[in-house]
């Protein structure tokens, strides 16, 4: 009950704080109850009274596997000349402002690669209700520690200076990356515990141990990866994360180091579920993460803790 009223009052932009405040001062307790039932029955999207971050309709297996989610997506280019700390990129975002703000994610490519190598994730994730920033790095040879700092610089740009900053909930942020960008994803989470989700995709890093991370992390490896073999990269990354942390290890079946560079339904459905569950606190997606997915044609192995604790 207390959660209902505090939540309703704490999302002022979407819900008309002036009108609510007027009712409260004029009507007192009766006004609070009236306003509360009005908000829960009419002004809020279904379920949003319980979770102010939840966006979009209830998910299904097919909605998270689809090539696009419910939101139409716009995009804008960020020139490298207009920013510092990273190499520019492309912002993909839900076109409509009717549903309020969204969580945001920065995504780094791997060694020698450009944002084009991870571009499929832009519209795929943004259409589910996130602002997604696929970045270029300062140089294509930057190492994971640098890529981690660049992911954070990109998030700072996104929330503080970008043209879409007013569309973002700056307290609900995450990071992803491929290969050395996945290594950078772990670095970013280690240095900024306020991040709500991290997903390294066939990550590469000389540092194999990540007990310092407190951000819920989905580690994605590929069974056939010979560049960042799971036995020396993704598996120790996952196993070294704190046992108390919400964490998961998804090993793709019949996959290589470069599987994350093209549209992939298994990567998409578990990334969407992880981002929704931990950036948006959206427990409607828990059903896709717990009980742990079973091995299949596309999943070599899946490890994790269930139920989730945060
Ligand atoms: O970003 C990556 O693909 C890292 C894999 C790699 O080539 O590391 C060797 C230096
Ligand atoms: Zn370490
Ligand atoms: Zn396999």
Image (cartoon, grey):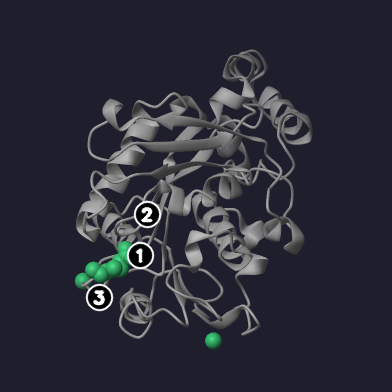
Residue 171 at x, y percent in the picture: 41, 41
Residue 203 lies left or right of residue 48; in this view the side is: left
Residue highlighted by disc 3: 209
Quarter holding residue 98: top right
Q: Is mark 3 within 8 Å of ligand 2?
A: yes
Q: CA distance from mark 1 to mark 2?
A: 7 Å
Which sits earlier in the primary sequence, circle 1 or circle 2?
2
Residue highlighted by disc 2: 109
Is residue 115 visible in this depiction of the protein?
A: yes
In this rendering, the answer to whether 128 lies above or below 252 is above
Relative depth, front residue between 186 and 266: 266
Residue 294 at x, y percent in the picture: 63, 83
Relative depth, front residue between 29 and 239: 239
Give the mark toward the camera: 2 or 3.
2
Q: Is mark 2 within 8 Å of ligand 1?
A: yes
Q: Is mark 1 within 8 Å of ligand 1?
A: yes
Q: Quadrant of ligand 2?
A: bottom left
In the rendered structure, find residue 179 and report the number of the disc placed on it: 1
Residue 102 lies left or right of residue 179; in this view the side is: right
- Asked whether the residues under the numbered discs 1 and 2 touch, taking CB atoms below 8 Å apart as contact, a structural biologist would say yes
Residue beneath the point at 30% across and 78% down: 240
**Neighbour tally class for label 1: few under 14, some 14-19, many 20 plus, Cα within 10 Å:** many
Quarter holding residue 200: bottom left
Is residue 310 visible in this depiction of the protein?
A: no
Which sits earlier in the primary sequence, circle 2 or circle 3?
2
Residue 268 at x, y percent in the picture: 59, 60
Residue beneath the point at 22% across and 55% down: 141
In this rendering, the answer to whether 8 lies above or below 306 is above
- Report helix, strand or loop for mark 1: loop
């Amino acid at each position: 009950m207390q959660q209902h009223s505090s939540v309703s009052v704490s999302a002022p932009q979407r819900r008309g704080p002036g009108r609510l405040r007027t009712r409260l001062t004029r009507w007192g307790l009766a006004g609070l109850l009236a306003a509360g039932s009005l908000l829960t029955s009419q002004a809020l999207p279904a379920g949003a009274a319980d979770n102010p971050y939840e966006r979009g309709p209830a998910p299904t297996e097919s909605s998270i596997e689809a090539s696009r989610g419910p939101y139409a997506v716009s995009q804008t280019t960020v020139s490298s000349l207009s920013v510092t700390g990273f190499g520019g990129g492309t912002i993909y975002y839900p076109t409509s402002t009717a549903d309020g703000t969204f969580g945001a994610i920065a995504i780094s490519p791997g060694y020698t690669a450009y944002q084009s190598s991870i571009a499929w994730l832009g519209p795929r994730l943004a259409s589910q209700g996130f602002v997604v920033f696929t970045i270029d790095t300062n140089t294509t040879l930057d190492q994971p520690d640098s890529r981690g700092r660049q992911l954070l610089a990109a998030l700072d740009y996104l929330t503080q200076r970008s043209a879409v900053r007013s569309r973002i909930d700056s307290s609900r942020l995450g990071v992803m990356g491929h290969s050395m960008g996945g290594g950078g994803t772990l670095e970013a989470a280690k240095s900024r515990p306020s991040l709500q989700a991290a997903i390294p995709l066939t990550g590469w890093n000389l540092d194999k141990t990540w007990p310092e991370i407190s951000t819920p992390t989905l580690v994605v490896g590929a069974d056939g990866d010979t560049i960042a073999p799971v036995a020396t990269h993704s598996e120790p990354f996952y196993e070294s994360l704190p046992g108390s942390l919400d964490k998961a290890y998804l090993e793709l079946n019949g996959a290589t180091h470069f599987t994350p560079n093209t549209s992939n339904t298994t990567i998409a459905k578990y990334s969407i579920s992880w981002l929704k569950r931990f950036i948006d606190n959206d427990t409607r997606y828990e059903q896709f993460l717990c009980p742990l997915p079973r091995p299949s044609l596309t999943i070599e192995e899946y490890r994790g803790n269930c139920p989730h604790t945060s």
